[in-house]
Image (spheres, rainbow, N blue to C red):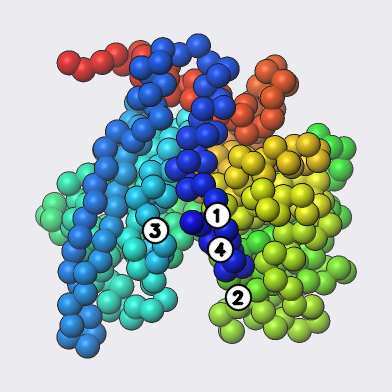
Amino acid sequence: MEKAHNGTAMKEASALATAQAQFDQAVQYLDLEPGLVDLLRWPRRELTVSFPVKMDDGTVRRFVGYRVHHNMSRGPTKGGIRYHPEVTLDEVRALAMWMTWKCALVNIPYGGAKGGVVCDPHKLSQHELEGLTRRYATEIAILISPEGDIPAPDMGTNAQVMAWIMDTYSMHRGYSTPAVVTGKPINIGGSQGRNEATGRGVIFTTREALKLLNKPLAGASVVVQGFGNVGSVAALTAHELGCKVIAVSDVKGGIYNPKGLDIYAVMRHARETRSVVGFPGSDGLTNAELLSLPCDVLVPAAMENQITAYNAAAVQCKVLAEGANGPTTPEADAILLDKGVFIIPDILCNAGGVIVSYFEWVQGLQAFFWEEKEVTERMEHFMVKAFHDVHREARRLQVDMRTAAQVLAIGRVADATTTRGLYP
């Protein structure tokens, strides 16, 4: 049972079932041995940890966490750490799998990983959050390293959480090891432009999609579901590039103004009130209503399984730019494609973050840092190249963009696995 962003329960496949269904669809276009297909369909290794944390009131509470490595044929594994009350092992498996394909698609030398802790970070004090993070980092330290597995922020985590993980790992090693995580604060080895990378990348790929539809980015109407790090930066980038952002939302609800929202002012309001709801000069709406607004571009940047067989027919966008991982189910894909919606798949659309994480890792290993302009330009180059690689593959195979992206990515991972051979 998955929950929609508006809180309505819907009977949907798990994230892992979605990821594997997409995989099964794509491998039909690749001539791979059945044994290799089965190998790529499942994670390489999984760690489940159960650990105590001393709370502020003196009680001890048990938490459960995960770290999953999906594939490492192309290099060290890379993937975020999620703090959320509904984290499951299947969700982490799916996210790790998507990370493998994402890294291969944009051609950076990583495999895929993901981590998570079942908790509500908003209900923990800063002291409790630090204690949980340091204990979880200690539990998964047997898997992470600058050469082997490099975590990053994800839903419910941020640069400060990465700083605690880096410090914990470094204390165990006896010297500072900044390259063990990415998404760190800049003053301890983070990269310029990392925080904005995913949201900016969403709009870079959206611009390329609109070009194919002979529509300029400036003036396009944009709707964004989710106003966290990805959604807010995507909305701001679109606003700065001349788009008319007509609606945005967060977990508490959404706001709508057909004439366009001042995203700078919305961000100030969200910082002050902890929600976009109630922004002056806008009408309120639910997340379900937001997803069905007529617009040029819809950016789902919240959770998985937001656009499903239940609501896909109501979606009225021309371009669906997947800022979140797995926001569209396979059943919804079929409905949207029949409607002529141009879908920019998640493993392409939101890859800006992992690209800049790669840049941060490289900078950390070399102790040589780049300016934000250079970081953003390099990321844009990777994103635009990957977009057109996928579009060419889609035309060659006469398939949709998601299938084409998966075919390219799976093929690259399969090639690397075959070239390396089997040990022993």
Q: Earlier in the sequence, mark 1 or mark 2?
A: 1
How packed mark 1 is, by other alpha carbons closer than 10 Å (few <14, some 14-19, many 20 or more), is few
Residue 213 vertical placement versus 196 (above, below) = above
Q: Which residue is mark 3?
A: 87
At label 4, the amino acid type is Ala
Q: Residue at x 41, y 30 (%)?
A: 41
Q: Residue at x 39, y 58 (%)?
A: 87
Q: Tell me the distance, in whole angstroms, between the alpha carbons under discs 2 and 4.
A: 16 Å
Q: Nearer the viewer, mark 1 or mark 3?
A: 1
The location of residue 106, given as percent across then percent down, is 53, 33
Residue 423 vertical placement versus 260 (above, below) = above
Q: Which residue is mark 4?
A: 9
Q: Which residue is mark 2?
A: 252
At label 1, the amino acid type is Lys
Q: Earlier in the sequence, mark 2 or mark 4?
A: 4
- The answer to which quarter of the image holds residue 295 is bottom right
Q: Which residue is mark 1?
A: 11
Left or right? Give the position of 340 relative to 79. right
Q: Quadrant of the C terminus?
A: top left
